[in-house]
Image (cartoon, coloured by chain):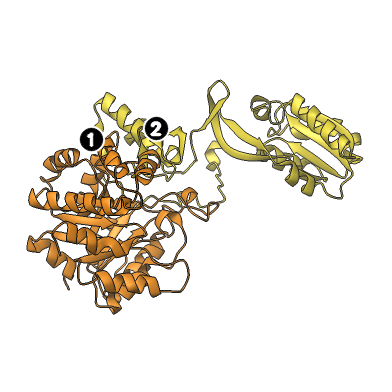
């Protein structure tokens, strides 16, 4: 069955996705609250997979909760914690329970997380995980064995348009599309001139692109990302704009900036939609959408 | 030359491993651990002093020329009197040496070092891991630079999102292997080989533990 998210991507409308992080523990109240708040406002909700290598409730559990609440989940799957057997098994389980959108990621290093001595698996990489899914859709597993009951997924991947050097990143982007990625959610973009150039290149490929929008919460947070997050580049003008906000109002400025960017991307038809990441402040996604004129 | 790169264990761990053992014989190595200053003559002497200061009796200390060599057994025989007096052998060689000595002596062996990787000296005082002996060499498609070893995640299809201005996001002292590979292939006019979608790797080329037996005619 074709997923609702895939239908949205193919409808030609400006698609909006957001992401929700599962909890550290079994108290699902906050995640459920975020799902209820966002499920009818966005086209799909990503559920992160041990984001930043911090052990949490599984993305598959979060995706099932989105289904239970009547929303459309995008299951994030990294290759960091599972070998090819476990990844394929989780895909079978996800599909059997109606979770049929997957975002394939290599995954952060365990070094950044809260189990720093763990083994990073990386048996497959993101493009090989996409290959595996496409093969399973044809009824075979990675070992070449027949599946009793196939899967069908809307498969996505990521790209970092601000990576330096850029060309190796673009070669990988093309390999992900060759492997079968249908949609791409980008790493955060802030410099829309740069993003426009990226799209001039990316538009030639048969893939839907959602621009990554990370909510800026303060000027120091923006500086921190520039210093510590690979492939994220917040221009000085935006940092200055954040710093210009009255005390205690930085978050409002962040919402204004994110809303303005989404609006501009949409009005200029730069790409097919946006992926809004309000890390830890998921309840603000509707305000960003309202600022963008989407609600 | 291939080198075994080692690092001294913490004093806390060494003290724990030697707890209850009063008489110690110390063995260093004249090859790799001399080069890395982890088990050469000066380090063996310093270890002996430190153990004496902690009240241990050092029955002897020596530096083998090449601890992992089969000749080690012969050299150890010459020191057997002093080794026999010891409760344990504290070994300042890599794990190859520790295991070679363990096979040649009935004494308990205790490593004083951790073996980090097999690599080479790439600049004065700098050692880099070069090959992880994966058994499925792809150097022919990566410009002679190994991503299985030199990429933190061992990725074979290009850089991850953590590539950071030519460095790896986990450590600014570590190069992004895929930036190096990209630059090299570009120089060679062979970027096409980076565009090849590599399938899942075979991690069982030689199932662990490795064992290789020469065909009869070659023995």
Q: Quadrant of the C terminus of chain A?
A: bottom left
Pointer 1 residue: B192
In this view, B202 is above or below A20:
above
Q: Secondary structure at mark 2?
A: loop
Question: Which color is chain A depicted in?
Answer: orange
In this view, B65 is above or below A193:
above
Question: Which color is chain B depicted in?
Answer: yellow
The disc label shown at residue A17, or none = none
Q: Chain of mark 1?
A: B
Q: Quadrant of the N terminus of chain A?
A: bottom left
Q: Residue placed farthest to the front in the image?
A: A246
Would you say residue A138 is visible in this rendering?
no
Q: Secondary structure at mark 1?
A: helix
Q: Earlier in the sequence, mark 1 or mark 2?
A: 2
Q: Return the residue nearer the eye: A40 or B184.
A: A40
Q: Return the residue nearer the eye: A132 or B43.
A: B43
Horizontally, is B77 left or right of A212 in the view? right
Q: Quadrant of residue A189?
A: top left
Residue B8 x, y percent position in the rendering: 68, 37
Horizontally, is A38 left or right of A84 in the view? left
Q: Chain of mark 2?
A: B
Whether tag 1 and tag 2 are in contact, CB under 8 A, the answer is no
Would you say residue A241 is visible in this rendering?
yes
Q: Quadrant of residue A274?
A: bottom left
Residue at the (82%, 34%) spot, across then down: B50
Residue A81 x, y percent position in the rendering: 44, 58
Pointer 2 residue: B145
């Amino acid at each position: 069955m074709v997923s609702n998210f895939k239908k949205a991507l193919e409808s030609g409308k400006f698609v909006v996705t957001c992401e929700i992080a599962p909890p550290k523990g079994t108290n699902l109240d906050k995640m459920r609250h975020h799902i209820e708040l966002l499920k009818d406002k966005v086209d799909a909700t990503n559920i992160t997979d041990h984001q930043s290598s911090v052990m949490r409730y599984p993305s598959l559990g979060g995706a099932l909760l989105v289904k239970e609440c009547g929303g459309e989940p995008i299951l994030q799957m990294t290759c960091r914690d599972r070998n090819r057997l476990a990844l394929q098994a989780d895909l079978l389980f996800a599909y059997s329970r109606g979770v049929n959108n997957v975002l394939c990621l290599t995954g952060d290093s365990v070094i950044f997380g809260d189990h720093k001595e763990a083994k990073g698996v990386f048996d497959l990489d993101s493009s090989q995980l996409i290959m595996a899914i496409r093969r399973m859709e044809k009824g075979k597993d990675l070992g070449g064995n027949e599946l009793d009951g196939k899967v069908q997924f809307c498969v996505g991947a990521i790209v970092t348009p601000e990576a330096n050097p850029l060309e190796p990143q673009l070669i990988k982007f093309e390999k992900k599309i060759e492997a079968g990625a249908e949609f791409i959610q980008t790493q955060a973009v802030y410099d829309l001139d740069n993003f426009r150039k990226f799209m001039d290149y990316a538009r030639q490929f048969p893939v839907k692109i959602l621009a990554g929008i990370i909510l800026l919460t303060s000027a120091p947070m923006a500086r921190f990302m520039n210093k510590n997050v690979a492939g994220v580049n917040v221009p000085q003008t935006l940092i200055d704009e954040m710093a210009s906000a009255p005390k205690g109002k930085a978050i409002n400025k962040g919402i204004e900036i994110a809303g303005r960017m989404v609006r501009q991307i949409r009005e200029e038809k730069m790409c097919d939609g946006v992926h809004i990441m309000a890390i830890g402040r998921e309840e603000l996604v509707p305000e960003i959408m309202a600022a963008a004129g989407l609600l | 030359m291939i080198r075994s790169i080692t690092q001294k264990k913490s004093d806390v761990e060494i003290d724990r491993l030697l707890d209850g053992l009063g008489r110690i014989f110390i063995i260093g190595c004249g090859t790799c651990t001399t080069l890395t200053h982890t088990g050469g003559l000066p380090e063996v002497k310093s270890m002996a002093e430190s153990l004496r200061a902690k009240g241990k009796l050092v029955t002897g200390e020596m530096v083998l020329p090449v601890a992992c060599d089969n000749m080690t057994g012969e050299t150890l025989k010459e020191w057997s009197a002093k080794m026999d007096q010891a409760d344990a052998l504290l070994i300042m060689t890599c794990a190859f040496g520790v295991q070679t000595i363990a096979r040649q002596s009935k004494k308990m062996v205790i490593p004083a070092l951790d073996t980090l990787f097999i690599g080479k000296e790439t600049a004065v005082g700098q050692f880099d891991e070069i090959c992880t002996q994966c058994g499925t060499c792809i150097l022919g498609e990566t410009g002679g630079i190994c991503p299985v070893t030199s990429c933190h995640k061992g990725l074979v299809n290009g850089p991850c999102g953590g590539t950071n201005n030519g460095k790896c996001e986990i450590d600014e002292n570590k190069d992004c292997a895929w930036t190096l590979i990209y630059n090299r292939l570009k120089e060679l006019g062979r970027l096409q080989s980076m565009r090849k979608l590599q399938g899942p790797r075979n991690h069982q080329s030689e199932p662990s533990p490795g064992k290789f037996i020469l065909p009869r005619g070659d023995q």
